[in-house]
């Protein structure tokens, strides 16, 4: 109709914990965060299409998004942060939080896991020593 309109837009920071809660409330059990008990101090969730869009990931990106990092953990010391997406642990591709948890649990105590993560649209290599 070619009418002029005023639109107000609010831009806010993504709250991954709230996003994770929303996924759980939608009765999608595969999106439940999983606390890794592998000595790294991470809470992970699956990358959903909605989350991929908010994190500006390619639509075909699969992995495990970090929803929480224990501040006194190996993950924090390695520089991993909320919103990082783990796509590979060692030579093994990761397509879900369960995959990442399984691969991380295979790392012996005192050894280093080599992660490939996507942060701010860029792939990064992150070594992390298991406590």
Image (cartoon, rainbow, N blue to C red):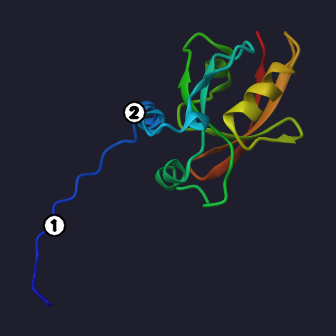
On screen, residue 30 versus residue 100, left or right, reads: left
Q: In which quarter of the image is residue 102?
A: top right
Query: Horizontal and vertical percent for residue 130?
Result: 78, 15
- Please name which of the two marks, 1 or 2, marks the residue nearer to the observer: 2
Quarter of image, res 4: bottom left
Vertical arrangement, residue 110 with respect to residue 126, above or below: above
The correct choice, above or below, for 50 with respect to 5 in the image is above
- Which residue corresponds to the image point at 63% horizontal and 27% vertical from the top-left? 79
Compared to residue 36, the image places residue 80 above or below, namely below
Label located before the other in sequence (1 or 2): 1
Instruction: Identify the residue under disc 1.
Output: 7
Give x and y (percent) for residue 6.
11, 70
**Residue identified by numbered label 2:** 18
Q: Tell me the SS state at disc 1.
A: loop
Q: Residue at x 22, y 58 (%)?
A: 9
**Quadrant the C terminus occupies:** top right
Percent of width and height locating residue 41: 64, 16
Q: Disc 1 versus disc 2: distance between alpha carbons?
A: 26 Å
Dot 2 falls on a residue whose secondary structure is helix
- Counting from the top left corner in percent of width and height, residue 51 is at 51, 48
Is 3 on the left-hand or right-hand side of 35?
Answer: left
Q: Which mark is residue 41?
A: none
Asked whether disc 1 touches disc 2, contact meaning CB atoms under 8 Å apart, the reply is: no
- Residue 105 found in image quarter: top right
Q: In this view, does 12 lie above or below 24?
A: below
């Amino acid at each position: 109709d070619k009418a002029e309109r005023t639109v107000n837009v609010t831009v806010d920071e993504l709250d991954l914990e709230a996003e994770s809660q929303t996924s759980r409330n939608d009765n999608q059990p595969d999106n439940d965060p999983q606390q890794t008990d592998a000595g790294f101090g991470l809470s992970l969730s699956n990358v959903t299409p909605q989350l991929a869009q908010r994190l500006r990931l390619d639509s075909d990106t699969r992995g495990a998004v970090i929803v929480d990092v224990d501040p006194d953990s190996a993950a924090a010391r390695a520089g991993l942060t909320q919103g990082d997406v783990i796509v590979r642990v060692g030579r093994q591709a990761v397509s879900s939080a369960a995959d990442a948890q399984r691969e991380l649990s295979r790392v012996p105590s005192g050894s280093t896991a080599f992660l490939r993560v996507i942060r701010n649209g860029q792939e990064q290599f992150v070594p992390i020593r298991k406590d």
